[in-house]
Amino acid sequence: MTGLSTPYYLLDETRLRRNLEIIQQVRQTAGAKVVLALKCFSTWCVFPLMREYLDGTTSSSLLEARLGHEQFGKEVHAFSVGFSRQDILGVREFADKVIFNSISQLRQHVDEVRGLKLGLRVNPGVSCSHYDLADPARRYSRLGVSDLGAIMAVAPLLSGVMFHFNCENDDLENLRRNLEHISQAYGTLLARLEWVSLGGGLAFTKPGYPVTAFCTLLRDFASRHHVQVYLEPGEAAITHTAELVTTVLDVVQNEIPIAIVDASVEAHLLDHLIYRTQPQVAAPGPGPHQVMIAGRSCLAGDVFGTFALDTVLQPDCEVRIADAAGYSMVKKNWFNGLPMPSICVRRLDGRVETVRTFGYEDYVASLS
Ligand SMILES: Cc1ncc(COP(=O)(O)O)c(C=O)c1O
């Protein structure tokens, strides 16, 4: 117990540093540059620590590009599925590289971004994703260009390309096969370029991942094509670094005990609802007591999951939901006017700091 009022997200810098040290190893051993994908994690109060281990940030919008520039520093990659002219005029103030999603976007904006390094997203037609929703190679995908002939026609405008084709991929052999495909299909293009981003979605900070072999694979790819390789991890950088700390408000019975906590899946851990996955409970620990843990929004399916715990949950019990950083904090919302979890950080010296609390003023300011 920390005495802080729940709900809050608790980021742990010591755990974060563990991921960052693996990233450092990849940078040093493979010679890859690594930029943080802000779409996954934008909680800038821990950027001072992250900046020591990363080369910069990559963004999906003008606002993220600006955040990367102002709060992180170092390199800023600016990608968007669709830039407006207004976006481009803003982005060019902050970005080192602008990466377009299509040839038409590149042609539309090329005059406004002369002098910057330009890239194009290439869709290699292969991917590794456990979810159709997140599969960039799905039928009718709008994400990136596949046609080599069309890309070669604009290659003189480009210094690099970005392939994002993985999602939570922890299978190195699958990556090896897909890189082989990319080498064969796009080798003539890569020969003209300075840099290649392999995107995000690689689970290389997961315990047991063959990091040394991964580094060899990346180094070989870079030297075969004479390019600077970039990685854009989101999840791999922050996986298992945060908890959503909640308090049980009520326990109701409907065939099974259902503990209602002072947070919500829909408002505070939305990705679990979108992908229909179940988070893990970090505390209480595992045991014989079955309980469903549910959120307090009005949504019938606002359910964290059913768990077997070592404690019989009662009002005032603390429940910690594990792995609450990636794609959660960036997606939190004001549904039902529920209290927005505070942001707390356990610093490297063990001190827990409440960095941000939210109140009625923030709720009101989010609409008008
Ligand atoms: C272009 C691009 N780069 C990087 C990422 C980060 O992926 P992850 O958080 O799975 O590492 C994504 C995620 O969707 C992406 O679309």
Image (spheres, rainbow, N blue to C red):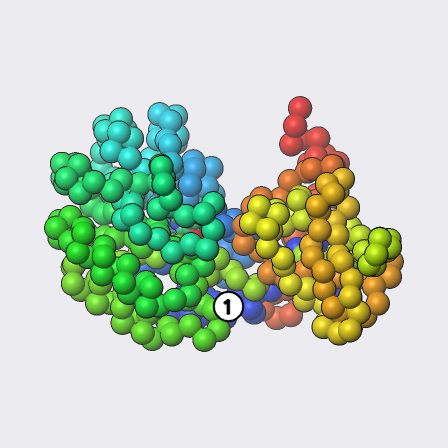
Q: Is residue 193 above or below residue 22?
A: above
Residue drawn at (78%, 66%) of the image = 290
Q: Tell me the quarter of the image containing the C terminus.
A: top right
Q: Residue furthest front?
A: 255
Q: Is residue 362 above or below residue 159?
A: above
Q: Is residue 351 above or below residue 60?
A: below
Q: Tell me the quarter of the image containing the N terminus.
A: bottom right
Q: Amino acid at mark 1?
A: Arg
Q: Is residue 5 visible?
A: no
From the viewer's side, name the closer residue of 294 and 367: 294
From the viewer's side, name the closer residue of 211 and 42: 211
Q: Position of residue 207 (x, y in %)?
A: 48, 73
Picture quarter containing residue 312? bottom right
Residue drawn at (45%, 75%) of the image = 208
Q: Position of residue 260 (x, y in %)?
A: 80, 52
Q: Would you say 33 lies left or right of 59 here?
A: left
Picture quarter containing residue 351? bottom right
Q: Would you say 240 lies left or right of 201 here?
A: right
Q: Would you say 157 lies left or right of 76 here?
A: left
Q: Position of residue 192 (x, y in %)?
A: 13, 49
Number of marks drawn: 1
Residue drawn at (67%, 67%) of the image = 282
Q: Position of residue 276 (x, y in %)?
A: 59, 51
Residue drawn at (68%, 38%) of the image = 334
Where does label 1 land, which residue? 17
Q: Is residue 217 above or below residue 233?
A: below
From the viewer's side, name the closer residue of 287 and 329: 287
Q: Judging from the image, what secondary structure is the residue with disc 1 in? A: helix
Question: Badge 1: few (under 14), some or many (20 or more) residues near its Cα, within 10 Å?
Answer: some
Q: Is residue 195 visible?
A: yes
